[in-house]
Amino acid sequence: MDKGRRDFLKISGTSLLGLGLGGTAAATGLHRAEPDPDAGPRWAMVVDTRKCREKHGCTACIDACHEIHNVPDIPDENHEIKWIWKEDYPNAFPTQVHAHTEESVFEQSVLVMCNHCERPPCVRVCPTQATFKGDDGIVVMDMHRCIGCRYCVAACPYGSRSFNWRDPRPYIDDVNGDYPTRTKGVVEKCNFCKELLAKGKLPACVEACAAAGNEGVLMFGDLNDPDSVVSEALRTANTIRRKPALGTAPHIFYIV
Amino acid sequence: MPSRDTGRIILGLVVFLALVSFPIWYTASQGRSGERPELVYPEDETRCVESAAYMKSWHMDLLNEWRDTVVREGERTYVSDLGHCDFDMSLQNTCMKCHLNKDTFCDRCHNYVGVEPKCWECHVEPGGASHGQG
């Protein structure tokens, strides 16, 4: 096919115009999400680190979570299992910290856990669909299907997943008979207390935090409910998420 | 015309059959031929999730169905065909709240038929977890 100079310029011009329009649309595509009450619940958590750091040394949430979920306490840190833990701020938010970050923020430990991402990399890589995202946004694990390949451990950018290198039972002091333990060779992580949500209860960490006398530190609720405590918190305070540039869209929000 | 090896062949067959049927006649000779595992049933509850005959034959399928329904679909309530009650689909929190002793119920049958379910590697039996093999 013989194309002349004129045709070439026409096609080039049209393509550039198309790219330009597309780019403009993409640039203005980010809008503030509004709660959608018809969409069913989308669970999320807001952590107010300003209040949390005032209770330096408090581990009520971690203790409660690990106790009810039979999370073992393994002294060897290469083998340790974590569902919820404290991370130094520069490690938790490596892209949102700089040499002149306010001292109280820079030096705090922030509470971290599975982010229950909107686009979870762990789900994409799991070869058996043992990890999957439910309609309520919770990223859960089907332990029966986990083959222990640890692709998810490698894929999670937040270190939220732990692998059972050994039988965890000898490292659980007081086994909670209402919840299973795990076995050697499977991965585990926070499940946003899906089993408690099913009974209309709040996650164990949130309950324990409030029971320890802290108000408004851990807030949990439905993003699609405009009146939920998380919707209210996100409306009234500025929040950040971990490693936003990765595009995983975490659903744990932090007020710093 | 019988060959000269006929006697040896017949003897060989008899020995072979005796060895192959050893488990049958040995058990019979011990007077245990009709023996069944004796299960200990719950004292305060006579109604199971489904009929006893169904549970005897299909409990493993029922448990697999419960597992998938709860974990994958998030549905936790089981409506029994018997219609007497709805149940939380949970091995630990429903089955084992009546069958309080895994040894005298689950294990007796499983040992008898030589199956080793993997349930208890994670699920906690009543009275606390036994430690795994490490």
Image (tube, coloured by chain):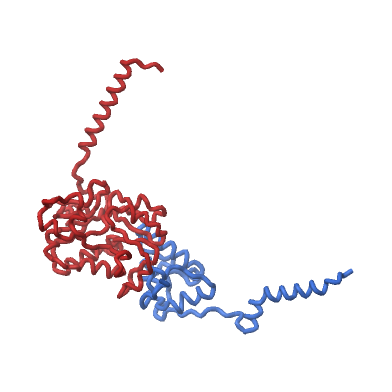
| Most foreground residue, B3 or A28 | B3
* Residue A162 in the image: above or below residue B113: above
| Most foreground residue, A219 or A161 | A161
* Residue A245 in the image: above or below residue B38: above
- Check the rendered structure and report the hue given to chain B: blue
Find residue A110 and report its image quarter: bottom left
Identified at 37% across, 65% down, the residue is A165
A197 relative to A32 in the view: left or right: right
| Most foreground residue, A106 or A196 | A106
* Residue B115 in the image: above or below residue A10: below
Find residue B13 and report its image quarter: bottom right
Q: Percent from the top left, x then y, of residue A107?
A: 14, 59
Q: Percent from the top left, x then y, of residue B30?
A: 62, 84
The residue furthest right is B1
A74 relative to B125 in the view: left or right: left
Q: Does any portion of residue B92 appear in the rendered image? A: yes
| Most foreground residue, A136 or B13 | B13
Q: Does any portion of residue A236 appear in the rendered image? A: no
Find residue A192 and report its image quarter: bottom left
Which quadrant of the figure contains the N terminus of chain A? top left
Identified at 80% across, 74% down, the residue is B8
Chain identity for the colour red used in the image: A
Q: Percent from the top left, x then y, of residue A243?
A: 23, 50
Identified at 35% across, 55% down, the residue is A152
Q: Percent from the top left, x then y, of residue A13?
A: 27, 22
